[in-house]
Image (cartoon, rainbow, N blue to C red):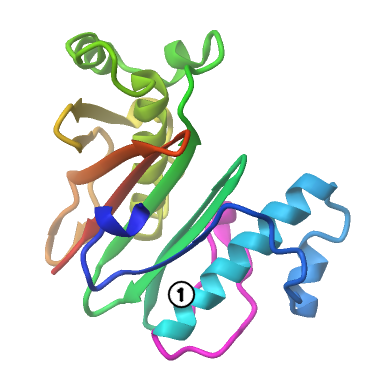
Amino acid sequence: MIESLLPSSVVCAHSFADRLDTLLFPEEEAVIARAVAKRRAEFTTVRACAREALAKLGHPPAPLLPGERGAPGWPEGVVGSMTHCQGYRAAVVARAGEVAALGIDAEPDEPLPDGVLEAVARPEDLTALAALPPGGPAWDRLLFSAKESVYKAWFPVGRRLLDFQDASVTILPDGTFTARMLVPAPDLLGRPLTGFSGRWAAGSGLVLTTIAVEP
């Protein structure tokens, strides 16, 4: 499903089951040496997905280590994004010359826990949510997911911690969303990065959001 939300230049790999038979590099093992079983399963499986996607671009297996603020380190000339939630892991990659920024997120299609929406939503976000039709996915969870995708696409460019309140997101029922950045804009592709356009989908008990910035 996630591949339908991204341009053909982006390579995707996902899994609905943990792939614990995947061998990690020693550097990766060191990252999760003290991790609980749930964290190890997420870390291992999403890297299995990432290696599968990178192989389609012609990259051999290599350690994929968390860097600044936990952002995954990708091989030279590659942009990518990872996500994991209960029952789903995915990674997407593209050549840096074809895609300038990527962000993906997956969440369970269920309402946010009490108090979370108030923490992540701006007043204008709430107004836009209230205008969405009933009977759709968990719109509040979709907003949360969209903001996660925004952060993942923005951080490798902006190199600055982003709060949920630093982006205003409008979700549309047609499967798209827009994000307006409320922080100083770095340059991307020769112009200020003031916002994003993204896509979303719901199915198999999940909501998915994606951002891909092409030249």
Residue plotted at (52% across, 76% down):
52
Visible in this render: residue 187?
yes
- Residue 184 seen anywhere in this rendered image of the structure: no
Q: Position of residue 15 (x, y in %)?
A: 55, 58
Identify the residue position indicated by label 1 in the image. 53
The chief SS type of the magenta part is loop
**Side of 137 relative to 214 (left or right):** right
- Residue under the image location 64 percent in, 54 percent down: 17
Q: Which of the two residues, 126 or 210, is positioned nearer the viewer here?
A: 210
**The quarter of the displayed image where residue 27 is located:** bottom right
The magenta-colored residue range is: 57-75
Q: Observer-nearest residue: 198 or 169?
A: 198
Q: Residue at 73% across / 70% down in the picture?
A: 28
* Local secondary structure at mark 1: helix
Compared to 66, does 158 lie above or below?
A: above
Q: Position of residue 38 (x, y in %)?
A: 77, 45
The quarter of the picture where the C terminus appears is: bottom left
